[in-house]
């Protein structure tokens, strides 16, 4: 969190088809300092279980929730003072906006999958692109989180973890506690 | 490229199962300034076609190739003077190594999917982790490329594109040429 409260809203998750990509998005949100991911789309208990299992073993705090209405969620977060950043390849360049965005203490980042409704663009405070090229919402989320937190989230310490990696030049070293 | 020659070696692609994740990896490699991706695994013509279609429309230069032996590819690149960085959650912390890595003009980045053989760790010049937490090889690749190029790749201009996005505060603006 590094002094910020960041939540990620994943727009448009579909059963099975999006399982792996949405899982990656959730884990990226957690690893790069967000405190919660909210999924607008199919209520997929397998994703919820796998993310909660990661939090249980690797630490938190991190939550996963589902919403039936992205709109209600977005509006509720705006009311709570969150600055809403919608990541879209059509938006303004991250490199020009990241400093300004990073000044907000509370940020909701919206990432899409399939086609996003026009209203998401209109109801966001900023529409932001990471490279203006077609690539991956997972990558866009990671780089945006890294840059708006000025890279500080990479040193984040997770609480109540049962498993922790000790960085190695070669091979694997894992510390476990029961 | 931003003055660097970066190639990505994707280790362990499997037909169908890995299609979307490997596609994301390829597009991230291109968008974040690598000049080529080499896939060690199933020779998947659908991935090749979809990446080449992106290059044709959105510009390059960027190539996609397959190899039957990650080891031969890795050895060949080392002989050509490439510094080999293997991204693994068990490795040394990116934030401590990125400056040193970024001094190399030629870099081969190896990203895995399923379990990676021990020899990949041994034959790489550096085993590097992005956060030491479980997340996504797509995100790890993007953040590593962004950091070792000191963020400059985000301004990269692609050549011979037929389609280009004009960044907008809201909505979509695309410039096409035939």
Image (cartoon, coloured by chain):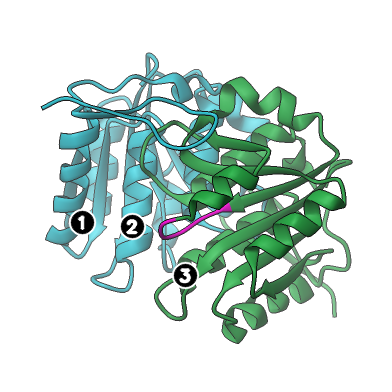
Chain colours: A cyan, B green
Marking on residue A47? 1
Q: Residues within 10 Å of mark 2 (few under 14, many from 20)?
A: many
Q: Which residue is pictured at 20% across the width and 65% down the height?
A: A42
Q: Which sits in the foreground, B105 or A44?
A: B105
Q: Residues within 10 Å of mark 1 (few under 14, many from 20)?
A: some
Specify the subunit that label 2 lies on: A
- The reply to whether the magenta stretch includes residue A170 is no
Residue occupying the point 37% across, 52% down: A24
Q: In this view of the protein, can residue A128 be seen by the observer?
A: no
Residue B156 vs residue B69, the one in the foreground:
B69
Expressed as whole percent of the image width and height from the top left, the position of residue A48 reads 16, 52
Question: In the rendered image, which residue does mark 3 sit on?
Answer: B20
- Do marks 3 and 1 both belong to one polypeptide chain? no
Quadrant, the C terminus of chain B: bottom right
| Viewer-proximal residue among A167 and A4 | A167
Residue A71 is labelled as none
Do callouts 2 and 1 mark residues in contact (Cβ within 8 Å)? yes
Chain letter behind tag 1: A
Q: Are marks 2 and 1 on the same chain?
A: yes
Cα gap from disc 2 to disc 1, whole angstroms? 8 Å
**Local SS, label 1:** helix
Identify the main secondary structure in magenta.
loop
Q: Which residue is mark 2?
A: A22
Q: Residues within 10 Å of mark 3 (few under 14, many from 20)?
A: some
What percent of the width, then of the height, locates residue A154?
Answer: 47, 25
The stretch in magenta equals B111-115
A9 sits left or right of B132 in the view:
left
């Amino acid at each position: 969190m590094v002094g910020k409260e960041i939540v990620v809203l994943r727009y448009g998750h579909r059963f099975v088809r999006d399982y792996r990509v949405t899982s990656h998005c959730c884990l990226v949100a957690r690893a790069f300092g967000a405190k919660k991911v909210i999924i607008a789309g199919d209520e997929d208990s397998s994703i919820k279980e796998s993310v909660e299992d990661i939090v249980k073993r690797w630490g938190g705090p991190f939550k996963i929730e589902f919403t039936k209405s992205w709109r209600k969620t977005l509006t509720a977060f705006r009311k709570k003072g969150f600055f809403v950043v919608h990541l879209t390849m059509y938006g303004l360049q991250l490199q020009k906006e990241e400093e300004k965005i990073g000044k907000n203490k509370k940020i909701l980042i919206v990432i899409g999958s399939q086609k996003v409704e026009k209203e998401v663009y209109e109801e966001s405070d900023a529409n932001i692109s990471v490279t203006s090229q077609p690539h991956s919402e997972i990558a866009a989320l990671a780089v945006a989180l890294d840059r708006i937190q000025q890279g500080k989230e990479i040193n984040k310490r997770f609480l109540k973890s049962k498993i922790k990696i000790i960085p190695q030049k070669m091979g694997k070293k894992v510390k476990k506690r029961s």
